[in-house]
Structures are given as structure tokens and as C-alpha cells.
Amino acid sequence: MNGKGERFLKDVLDRFDEAAETLNLDEGLREFLKTPKRVVTVSVPVKMDSGCVKVFIGYRVQHNNARGPYKGGIRYHPDVTLEEVTALAMLMTWKTAVVDLPFGGAKGGVKCNPKEMSRSEIERLTRRYTAAIADVIGPHIDIPAPDVYTDPQTMAWIMDTYSQLKGAPTPEIVTGKPVHVGGSEGREEATSYGVAVCVREAAKKFKIPFKNASIAIQGYGNVGYNAARILHDWGAKIVAVSDSKGGILCRDGLIPEKVMEHKKKTRSVVNFQGAENISNEELLELDVDFLIPAAIEEQITIKNADRIRAKVIVEGANGPTTSEADKILAERGIKVVPDILANAGGVTVSYLEWVQNLQRFRLSREEVLKRLDDKMVKAFDEVLEYSSRYEVDMRKGALLLAVHRVAEAVNSLGIWP
Ligand code: NAD
């Protein structure tokens, strides 16, 4: 087993096995839940701007739909493999179950390098990929969304292609669309809002004063910046942030909007006036109340876990903490609010977008965020309840809760034919 995708899939399956063991699931049900219900591989021929034709490989893996239609993003990346997409599809099943959405889990991907492609090449790729999977997706079957290097524009192309094929406007086929073609208010900051709710709830439950709580955030993109903005608005103190070029520290607190203005001008948060430059490694090891990794995977590892000094880690990013690091953090009493709970705000608002599309009505931003807040608080409490019932950390508690919910649904439905 050499590939990153294969290692990732093995890790996801191992964690599932552990949860299944704790829940005492029977062998047949374990096999059922480990195996995706449908795996689709398609070739995606695209006429490039040069006139030549290139063929890309695309996937859609539908892991489980016992709790509702499949739901999951589509990523465009040169490293996409079937194993990676399969692991991500399974994680989507657990994520939608943790926040109790009536969805299953799926993921899609096309192996390509969008950084080397023109906008019109990406549009043709998207439309052909959509046509290739059109028979297995649908508003009540499988609803895609954006992921790495796909965005609201990509979703608009998918919606249009699907609508043309079916002969009727079908906004409910994808979520994460631009607002003017049926996207939801509040979608852009949804993931960060969910992260912020987890920080607020963790402060309450772990008895850390929220007002002026010190927060360090790794990554200043969509999730990191919006989380900084919301938490600052709520009275917490953002003391450090970073991006791929490095980080900044200001113990008196940063104004997130000002840092963003600086980043827009200089393409980085580094050298922000009044703050001290620090490295990403230093940011992760700061003595703060909350650390929010909101960049990429595998940032807290066996190499730095014993130097982390945050009281609580709230995972905005997917997979920022390795399993070995988890053990060290647990021994050191550092709490981790896991990704499948902490960053589930995005898929929760995707659910609200889908419902709005199906019913042809619109919620205001305030209504969306209120519903999101309620869902996140409920999920946070349920995960804590599971972790104390089984005496495990919150990551295992979240997985136990999710697997229990999906297993219950599969058992109730039975197997037919
Ligand atoms: P983004 O591309 O908008 O931002 C990523 C940020 O991370 C950028 O500021 C980039 O400079 C920084 N970064 C990259 N490499 C880094 C490194 N080595 N060290 C420090 N910073 C680094 O992406 P995003 O949408 O904000 O997503 C961030 C994470 O959150 C990803 O793991 C993503 O899978 C996860 N996530 C995002 C959403 C969503 O709705 N956007 C939902 C769920 C999970």
C-alpha cells in the first residue's frame, strides 16, 4: 500500500471497525457499511483550447443512502484517486448523520489540474462530467456540492447541464450555487459559523470564559477568515492567524477585516502592521484557549502533538490531526472537537439550500443561521453525550453517534430484494 489515498481509506475503515466493535454491530452489517453501494468511473473527454482532445477520469462514489439521498462534494485535483474518493464518501455518510440531516454520503472527483486549465476548459470538463454521471445523480438520489477547486460557478454549470438534459430548471440538483440561481443566503460563512458555534459551546461545557478567549487560526481562506470574523464579533480575541506564507501574532487581538484588507493587498497576512511575524509551526504551538486548524490535513502530528498548548482544538479543516497525534493530545488532556462535527455547518446549510429549492421559497440569512445554530448545538451536545457514555474522546463519540444512526436506519429498512 503506497498511495496516500489508500492509506487514507485504510485509516477511515480502521476507525469505522473500532466504532463497529464498540457498538457490537454484527459482521454482515459491518461489511454492508464498509462497502459503497455504488461506484461509478467515467471517462471525460474534453476539447482543449488548443483543439486537441484530452480524456480525464472522473468518479462518483455513493457510500450509503439509508438515511436519505446521497450528499457530497466534487473535487478537481491531480491527486484524485478512487480510494480517496471512496474514503471521503464514507466520511460524508458519518458527517450528515452526526448533524442528523436526512442525507447519506457520497463524493465525486475528476483527476485533473484546474490550475493549468482555462475557464472554458473547466466549463467543458464540468458539463461532460455532469452528463456522464447524470443517470446516477438527481434531486432525490444524489446531490453534489463544491469541494477542493470547485466553486459556486462549477455548481451553476452542473445545474444548467442537468436542467438542459432533463428539460426543466432543476436547482435542487446541486447545493453551493450562486445565490441568484437558488443558492442559500448564509452559505458562504456556514462552515465558519458552525466552527464558531463549536468554540462557543466548548467554552461553555469546558468552563473557559468565552469573552476575550484567546484564539489562534491556521489558514485564512474561506473557513479561517470567516471564523475569525464571527468569533471576533462575538467577543473572543483572535491573537494569531496564518496562511501558506506564514503567520502573525498580536496578543492584544487582531481585527479580522483589517487583516483581510492587508492580505488582499499583499497576498498574505504576513507583515501586518502592529503584529509580530511567526511561522505556521509556532502558531500551532501557541498558548491559547482555542486553536482552529482551517487550512489543510495532517498539521497536528506525532512531531508536534506534545508541544501543542491550546486548551481545545476545533477542527475547521478536514483531517488536520493524525491518529497518533490524537492519542498524545488525549493523554495531555487537550480536547478536540472533531472535523465531522466542527465543520458540518457547510453541509447543514447545503441541506437548507436543497429544502428551499424543493419548496421554491427563500429563507433570510438570519433564519438560515438560526437554524444552523440550533442544529450545531444539538449535535455538539449529542456528541458529548456519546463520548461520556462510552468514555471516549469527542472524535470517537462523534463516529459512534454517526455509525449508530446509520446502522439503525439500515436495520430498519432491511435488505431487498
Ligand atoms: P481556502 O482555500 O479558502 O483556504 C485555505 C487557507 O489555508 C488559505 O489561506 C491558504 O493560504 C492556507 N494554507 C494552505 N496551506 C497552508 C499551510 N501549509 N499552512 C498554513 N496555511 C495554509 O479553503 P477553505 O474553503 O477555507 O477550506 C479550509 C479547510 O476547511 C479544508 O480542509 C477544507 O476541506 C475544510 N472545509 C471547508 C469547507 C467549506 O465550506 N469551505 C467545509 C468543510 C470543510
Image (spheres, rainbow, N blue to C red):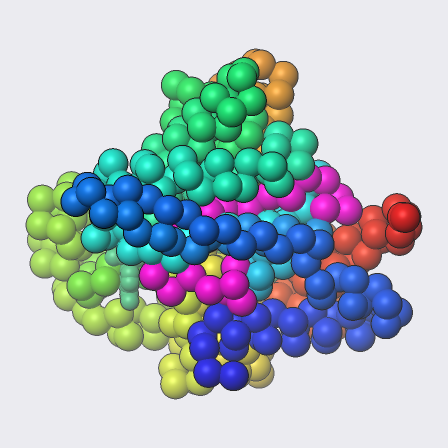
Q: Is residue 414 visible?
A: yes
Please give left or right for residue 165 compared with residue 257 in the image. right
Residue drawn at the location 65% of the way across and 71% of the way down: 13
Please give left or right for residue 12 compared with residue 265 in the image. right
Query: What is the x, y in percent for residue 381?
Result: 68, 51
Which image quarter has ligand 1? bottom left
Residue drawn at the location 68% of the way across and 46% of the way down: 104
Q: Which residues are magenta?
A: 65-85
Query: What is the x, y in percent for residue 404?
Result: 79, 58
Q: Is residue 367 visible?
A: no
Which residue appears farthest toward the front when viewing the image? 52
Residue drawn at the location 71% of the way across and 65% of the way down: 34
Q: Residue 74 in magenta? A: yes
The foreground one among 334 and 134 is 134
The foreground one among 299 and 313 is 299
Q: Quadrant of residue 136?
A: top right
Query: What is the x, y in percent for residue 287?
Result: 36, 71
Q: Quadrant of residue 112?
A: bottom left
- Tell me how many marks there are: 0
Q: Residue 328 in magenta? A: no
Query: What is the x, y in percent for residue 265?
Result: 9, 44
Is residue 296 shown above or below 414?
below
The foreground one among 134 and 28 is 134
Residue drawn at the location 46% of the way across and 64% of the way down: 81
